[in-house]
Amino acid sequence: MFSTSRRTGARRSSRGRAGRALSALAVLCLTVVAPSAAHAETSTPAAAAAQQITVDSAGTGRTFDGVGAISGGGGTSRLLVDYPEPQRGQILDYLFKPGYGASLQILKVEIGADTNSSNGAEPSHMRTPTQVDCDRGYEWWLMEQARKRNPQIRFYGLEWGAPGWFEDGFWSSDNVAYLMKWLGCAERHGLDIDYLGGWNEKGWDAAWYGELKKALVRGGYGKVKVVAADNAGWDVATDMKNDPAFDAATDVVGIHYPCSAIHCSSSQDALDLDKPLFASESGWNNYLTGAVRLAAEMNHEYVDSRITAFINWPAAYAWYPTVQMQGSGLLRANEPWNGHYELGPTLWTIAQTAQFTRPGWRYVDSASGYLDGGGTYVTLRSPGRKPQYTTVFETTGATQPQTVDLTPTGQLPRGALHRWSTTLESTDSADWFVRGADVRPDATGAHRVTLQPGTVTTLTTMSGGKSGAAEKAPASRPMSLPYRDTFDGYRTAATPRYLSDMEGAFEAARCTAAPQAASGSRGTGKCLKQVITTEPTKWSRVASPLTLVGDAQWTDYTVSAKTLIDRTGTASLAGRIVNQLNNAGTGRVNVWEGYYLRLSDAGTWSLEVIAPDKATRVLASGGLPAAGADTWHRLALGFSGDTITARVDGDVVARVTDATYDHGQVGLALDSYTTSQFDDLTVRAAGH
């Protein structure tokens, strides 16, 4: 176990995601929104002279490392993989296809550990010290799809949690070996990993990074760049400055959420390291309303802090709306049953930079800075003897139109510049990523443009650029009933369609032969089995295994499932699940609001409700004639208005009145890490 120069999670910024949400609100409050017609050129007051910006082909600046997004932090892309075609392909095009939509240049993925990391749990590739499965989960598929669309995309792996079998905890040789196996899996999938981090937002261990670097070189992965430390705050750069071994072991300084509403932090120690500085997790913006903050962050991170890569959390809002942080991402894709998805100005704000730049370009510091009338601008140029260049302006801090003159010098092209713009708070898609008239130079060689407040505008020599022209997505509609899954049609160890694990891993497996209860029925063929038996090293406070499925809009229905409790503990059937309650400020574990019918190994049962204040109320309870373990039972919960009916093995054991919740999806839960099973999960509308 490595302990030198360890920093713990206590050193992280206290701002947190809730604070960032408030900061985003502050941006909205500070910004004056331009009307949609503001894309047209208008004159500024006579007293306001045009700001002069000169772009020199020999201008110096840091190397641009790219614009990216994250699939991770717990199942953020879970529902995307279950989308039908052609909608799934359209969504992937909007995210990854160059010159089409967001045109992401970096994809950062979670290295799963079967434990919750905000919005769910992603499968581990290695659940014991000797067993490796390179086909679990959907991140391999997503990386393959991204590379198919953009062969130059860069990949970045990071852990949020870790399997429980590591003898010396997270900062251990076991974990280094675990990461080497993950890189081997990537190689099997034909994927080259560009960046590898440590433990998301949980501090760092300097000596461990040294061991990781050595292992990468020994294992033939010397080109993989090590990022430290995926935490908030710049203290890690000071540690590198004071620890030559730590400095030598790392290639990139990765910081989370370095920006307030109007300014991004930095440190002289970080700048003096002569390493790339990444906002390795930033953004956390709503796909419809987050464009203002996003536009400000992307430019301010370089202008204020010399950060050269922006990686948005997350790539897509592709999880159930019963789970926290709803709406975050570049687009919404959480209705796979009908193919509905939605875009917004946030995606096109990313496109304003990513479609007209490439990793490896250089910033031009002398043509990057603050706009006189409020806002910022950054200029990037390509390498080579005939460079291209792009300037991106954001005016979130402006209250009036302002005019700038952009003048190229040196070897830069002198012709017309292509213009693209997005009105950041417009709800009209006609105002997103709009191709304007080319801006031609005047007699002095200057390209004059008037910038409206509340916009992002790109002037570029790069041809192309496209607001994707996929067919209109199907209309949004609730998931139809009846819903049923017998789990028989899946390969062993597969995650069944639409199931989203919040903790643990629920997979298709051969049903265990066991007696059935009177009036019950045993599982047959394949079942849903929870396979994690050792508690993982956790990132968030989620108590025990749980998986969710269905539509949060469902109201009156009956959900039923067979269950086999493995020796000890309880198995629960949940209904009307409406919301994840996180542990912020309470010290308690994450829980999901809704109703639960629990059956114990001893044969006792209880009907419970978890209220919005996290209090659990027992609505009814009782016992069965025999023990509940090692015997197949059928549980059922019926909802009709405020009447709730609980059944065990076909018998009504409780009928109560409770009006806490009137809608929500369904779930299956255990109170411990056991290999209990479920089968024949069925949801029928009330009266059917």
Image (tube, rainbow, N blue to C red):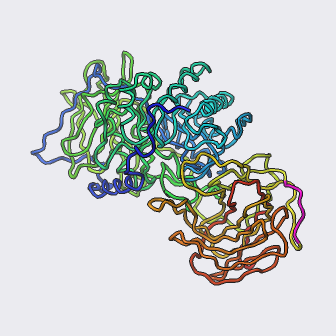
Q: Nearer the viewer, residue 492 or 369?
A: 492
| Residue situated furthest top in the rendering | 385
The quarter of the displayed image where residue 335 is located: bottom right
> Is residue 515 part of the magenta span, yes or no?
yes
Residue lying at 39% horizontally and 30% vertically, measured from the top left: 462
Residue lying at 36% horizontally and 36% vertically, measured from the top left: 235
x, y (%) of residue 626?
85, 72
Question: Going by the image, does 76 lie left or right of 64?
Answer: right
Q: As displayed, is residue 120 above or below residue 522?
A: above
Position of the N terminus, as image quadrant, is top right
Residue lying at 12% horizontally and 44% vertically, measured from the top left: 48
x, y (%) of residue 576?
62, 70
x, y (%) of residue 552?
60, 66
User: How many labels were placed on the picture?
Assistant: 0
Residue lying at 62% horizontally and 52% vertically, measured from the top left: 79
Q: State whether the magenta stretch is mostly helix, strand or loop.
A: loop
Q: Nearer the viewer, residue 166 or 97?
A: 166
Note whether residue 472 is visible. Answer: no
> Is residue 396 part of the magenta span, yes or no?
no
Q: Which residues are magenta?
A: 511-517
Question: Going by the image, does 676 lie left or right of 112?
Answer: right
| Residue situated furthest left in the rendering | 47
Note whether residue 25 is visible. Answer: yes
Q: As displayed, is residue 93 above or below residue 648?
A: above
Position of the C terminus, as image quadrant, is bottom right
x, y (%) of residue 282?
42, 44
The quarter of the displayed image where residue 51 is located: top left
Q: As displayed, is residue 561 above or below residue 400?
A: below
Q: As displayed, is residue 124 above or below residue 628?
A: above
